Amino acid sequence: MREISAVFVIASAIVSTSCVSTQIGSAVAPEFAGRSYRRILTFAPYSDLILRVAAEQQLALYNDSTRAVLIPSHTVFFPGRDYSSDEVTAAMRRLGIEATLIITPGDSGQSQGYLPPSYSSSCSWSASTGGCRSAAVGGVAYSSAWARHTARLYDAQSGSVVWIASLSSQGDLGAQMPSVVRSMASSVLGKLTEDRIINWQRPARPR
């Protein structure tokens, strides 16, 4: 007689992609309330170029010619050399930079975790035999990155701090630092827009 088999899985699913959550608090300088910016130079001074590029490119994802342009500093100033203050000033004038966003990394590290195993049961039935077998699958220890950052936006003309924010990011299920950095940068963008520091209004269409 033909044997019929069935497999039942009792488990919590193992998520294959990591997730990062970021908390952010910000404040706008009272004297700059109501001021917004369209052309912003971004600078994330990581010693690791991979992280610097990840942060500055994530910020540039906002770019929209009808709103604001965030320019990654690594595309303007080659990371392999030093620039004089005159060279920096000249480049900023040439690009029409109105403000500079500097994101400074703080404490960071790895937190440890454990993903419990899943369990599977395999049952078969036939005329002569039948029964079930259970087996454990997985059970994995992992580490996830976390980091703290401070973000400051400086007015290009006065050099004054216009906006400041503190950020705390925590990854889970094996998230690594580049993912943490991208989450942080996305949160900075969201808060700049919420605080109306970025020029968030589209211009009216001509009639």
Image (cartoon, rainbow, N blue to C red):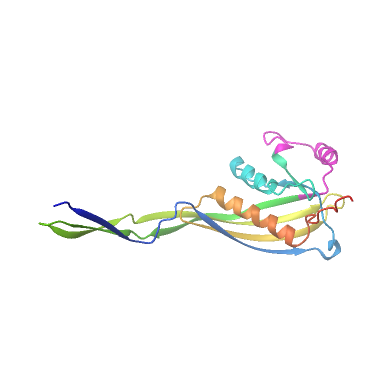
- Nearest to the observer: residue 102 or residue 192: 192
Residue drawn at 74 percent across, 51 percent down: 101
Q: Does residue 107 appear left or right of residue 67 in this picture?
A: left
165 vs 49: above or below: below
Number of marks in the image? 0
Quarter of the image where one finds residue 91? top right
Judge from the rendering whether residue 89 lies leftward or rightward of residue 164; answer left or right. right
Q: Position of residue 112 (x, y in %)?
A: 44, 58
Left or right of 4? Residue 20 is right
Determine the residue positioned at 80% across, 48% down.
66
Indicate whether residue 88 is drawn in magenta.
yes
Residue sitting at the far left: 128
Asked if the stretch drawn in magenta spans residue 54, the answer is no
203 or 15: nearer the viewer: 203
- Residue 45 shows up from this direction: no
Residue farthest toward the right in the current orientation of the protein: 207
Residue 192 in percent (x, y) is at 73, 58
In the figure, residue 27 lies in which quadrant?
Answer: bottom right
Q: Residue 77's image quarter?
A: top right
Front position in the image: 142 or 193: 193
Q: Position of residue 51 (x, y in %)?
A: 60, 45
Residue numbers of the magenta segment? 75-100
Residue 14 visible to the viewer: yes
* Image side of residue 118 versus residue 77, left or right: left
Residue 44 on image: x %, y %:
67, 47
* Farthest-out residue, front: 1
